[in-house]
Image (spheres, helix red, strand yellow):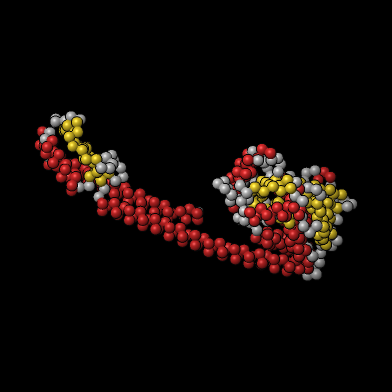
Amino acid sequence: MKKKLHYLPFLISILSIFVLATYLRYSLYLDANKFSAEFQAQNAVELSSADIYKISTKLNRLYSVGNWSCLVGKLNEREFFAIKNTLCENSLITQQINISSKESGLKLQMTLSLSEEKRKIFIMMLFFQLCIILSVRFIVQLVESKKKEELRAFNIKAMRFSHDIRSPISAIYSLIESNEVGVDSKNKAIILNALDVIKNSSLELLMSGDKSHVATVVNIPDSIREVVEIKKVEYPLSNIKLIGLLNARSIIIETHFKRIISNLINNSIEACDKNKCEIIISIFNNDKNVIIEISDNGKGIPQHVQEKLGTKIFTTKTKGNGIGLASAHEDLSSWGGKLEIKSSSKDGTVISLMIPSIEECSKVILIDDDELTRMIWNNKAQKQGIDLTCYKSVDGFMNEIESINIETTIYIDNHIGELSGVELAEKLNKLGFKKLYLATGSNPNDFVGFKFLKGVIGKEPPF
């Protein structure tokens, strides 16, 4: 509804221009009809007798005093008088008048133009409406910019509030759980459910600061560490450890990844004895993948239940719908990864996430017209032992495309030559290339919806 209101001033301006043009055109039509009637009444004798000398004299006189673009006289289809300057047909600023006498075979074709005064009025109104449109557009952009700043400030405050409120909530949660406040079991369940709602809402709010829905380069350990710190506040009685690599990068949607990790930790805690819960998150890699293992000492998952996990219609929770694991499978699959579950009642559960490492690329191509960027990528590739080929133009790349394997990973600057990076990526995708990324300084959110892109990264080398 708000977007429609933004266009309302423009629609009003366009409508007012249309009304003005219609009014001027109609007034021209009325003037032409009025003149036609007067001319025929005043020159009835000349018209019926086909006195072309007198008619020509009057047409000459008319042209010198009126707004005429064309005056043509014909006798038996032969022209005896003709002045043709511009338009002789009907248009926005001209109206044609046809006068004829069947008795004498005389025909007059007279085209009346809009007066100079009315043309100036029309041009002034167009200019005035253009000023209004530009002014309204400027005001709307100014208001929207202010609202965005206010919303950003509000989001920061909301995230701070969400972060700060989690500690006192956890303290209340612990007191209720320990029965130190003397709450009966019925009221205890109600309070704990209410606290769960507040905790989950604050977690969503805390993670809502990043609105990106485009895959970008993410350091997996850093992203998991942020979630773990939050969980330690939420569940102070649980022992959550993060071990393994400090640096392991992949191209994923970070907000979705954090949600997956958060849900899996929640599941592990729910499966444990809350006073003896131990969760270990290990991060390591092999030749192609970053491996994240989340292990717990819980009660395990029966085999018949494991076979059904990941479908949206199945869950073991009384208040769940199975969407969490199903969404995790979908996200991981879209990033080229997968999720595996191993569980037993004796050893607990181990959930393994496998995500393609960004270092898996054996052959990499960069298409960028900036010499400094190419130098930085080349230097980094040499140090990392990566086979990198840089092209400074689209033409240079296209000249060698037949010799390039379609499995090659290609990074494209979004501003290069006549084609944008998005347009070039779409073209390459149709040729069979699938590992296509934008390497740009633009906001990744500007490229949401381009399914042929595997991700959007910055100008820094992703290896």
Viewer-closest of 37 and 278: 37
> Which of 56 and 349 lies nearest the eye of the viewer?
56
Q: At 35% from the left edge and 54% from the top edge, which residue is drawn?
A: 126
Query: In this view of the protein, can residue 338 be seen by the observer?
Result: yes
Image coordinates of residue 16 in percent, x first then y, are 36, 52
The structure residue drawn at horizontal position 76% and vertical position 54%, both measured from the top left corner, is 383
Nearer-the-camera pick, 217 or 225 = 217
In the rendered image, the vertical position of residue 106 relative to residue 111, given as above or below: above
User: Residue 287's x, y, as percent?
Assistant: 80, 48
Direction from residue 285 to residue 397 in the image, left or right? left
Q: What residue is at 50 percent from the left and 54 percent from the top?
A: 3
Residue 342 in picture, x, y percent from top left: 84, 48
Number of numbered discs present?
A: 0
The answer to whether 251 appears left or right of 100 in the picture is right
Lateral position of residue 202 relative to residue 51, left or right: right
What residue is shown at x 19% (from left), y 45% (from top)?
63
Vertical placement of 90 versus 239: above or below?
Answer: above
